[in-house]
Image (spheres, rainbow, N blue to C red):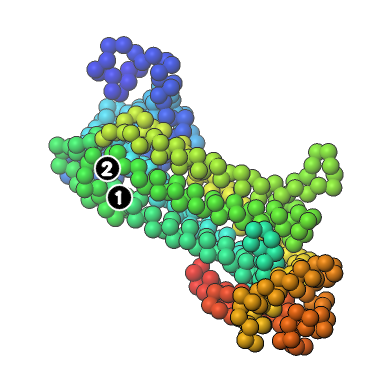
Amino acid sequence: MSKLWGGRFTKPTNKLVEEYTSSIGFDDRLALQDIKGSLAHVDMLGKCGIISQEEAAQIIEGLNIIQKKVENEEVTFSVEHEDIHMNIEKLLIDEIGPVGGKLHTGRSRNDQVATDMHLYLKEKTTYLIQLVEAVQEALVSQAESHVETIIPGYTHLQRAQPVSFAHHLLAYFWMFERDKERLKDSVKRIDWSPLGAAALAGTPYPVDRKMTAETLGFDNVYPNSLDAVSDRDFILEFLSISSILITHISRLSDELILWSSQEFDFIELDDAFCTGSSIMPQKKNPDVPELLRGKTGRIYGNLMGLLTLLKGLPLAYNKDMQEDKEGMFDTVETLDGALSLLAPMLASMEVKGANMRQAVNEDYSNATDIADYLAVKGLPFRQAHEVIGKIVLYAIEKNKYLLDLTLDEYKEFSELFEKDIFAKLAPEQVVAARKSEGGTGFEQVAQQLELAKQHIK
């Protein structure tokens, strides 16, 4: 069969060219969106008198039949028909005859594919927002159980100050909250309809773009036809937001990997999210968080690929833009899998609070509180910092921790020390003392938890 666009050509397409330029191998994922856009378009054509109401009804009936076949996986798409648009149109013509050829009146594949991608990404972004919220719910659930569980807080991966484990988990909650807000905000840019822009210059037919936009659930129409068919900013923005989101997933995954190691032994991941070794029977490998961490480069690559693709393209549509879809599809699927695994993995992990507490007992992360103690008694903080540095060095040399030192030993460094220094150094007191807004003090963490719950209601 000749191509649907073949009237201008005297030779058939080279088979290698046909295979190389075909996009049906990946844009078949847009089949339902393509049919949805076509239904809105043909309904508008009939209501605007561009084709007869009878023709419109016949085409709509045919599209509905094809939609059911697609949903039931009864359709085979062909490379010969290049892309999802031509495949659907060919199926329609086979189903209802030549009148199916009127479907494409007043539009181009350029505005058609852009419409499909807007529809697809709006749907998927809304779905991903729900998955992000499920991760947040898992974090909140764990945090509620561990407000008073104390873990070493780190800077430079060195123990710095003890913190509430809930406080640590909630740091990720707020990262994901920003991701969720970015995704929500991006829908404003996705929610524009290109349909009716045609190839690049609009169409002489009296189409009603606002009608199709409303039918498809878009809030706006592109005011410029050139921009409508060439804009891929909405995909770039999605990939950029996704890159930040996968960064946060990767950072959390890295901590889960560290915490589940024998060296830390702060948590144990459920067996359902780990694998074993083919040679070392004692191993329990955190493969899921490792792979979540590893997927980061994949999404970064999709963003850089599209940025590079678009940087030198003149207006309007160019065949290069066929390469805009696979990275988008891959990113959606990668995030879908990552978020769907992360939420139950967090919810089911065992927190080893006693091990966390023991780690806090065996470090010098309460040193800052000694400096604060002296500062409150009138010693300038910088001088107090020097005194405590000497105390820590002394304790290390004596193979002791700060709570192991006697009052006499403390007084060797400053007469300002009294018996109350030991109460100040207790890890629970060190954490509880951080009462500043957003701090790790137990009361502040409880308030933060309530705020977090409000954000996921």
- Compute the Cα span from label 2 to label 1: 9 Å
**Residue 69 appears in the figure:** no
Q: Which quarter of the figure has residue 53?
A: top left
Kind of residue at disc 1: Trp
List x then y, in percent, for residue 428.
Answer: 71, 78
Label of residue 41 in the image:
none
List x then y, in percent, for residue 334.
Answer: 54, 45
Name the residue tied to disc 2: 228
- Do labels 2 and 1 touch, CB within 8 Å? yes
Q: Is residue 83 left or right of residue 148?
A: left
Q: Nearer the viewer, residue 318 or 432?
A: 432
List x then y, in percent, for residue 323.
Answer: 41, 33
Q: Is residue 246 left or right of residue 241?
A: right
Q: Is residue 421 left or right of residue 80?
A: right
List x then y, in percent, for residue 284.
Answer: 78, 49
Q: Residue at x 64, y 62 (%)?
A: 155
Kind of residue at disc 2: Ala
Mark nearer the N terminus (2 vs 1): 1
Q: Residue at x 77, y 59 (%)?
A: 265
Q: Nearer the viewer, residue 81 or 248?
A: 248
- Label 1 Cα neighbours within 10 Å, binned few <14 / some 14-19 / many ≥20: many
SS type, badge 2: helix
Q: Residue at x 44, y 61 (%)?
A: 181
Q: Residue at x 76, y 59 (%)?
A: 264
Label of residue 192 in the image:
1
**Residue 451 appears in the figure:** yes
Q: Where 305 sits versus 283, above or below?
A: above
Q: Nearer the viewer, residue 349 or 176?
A: 176
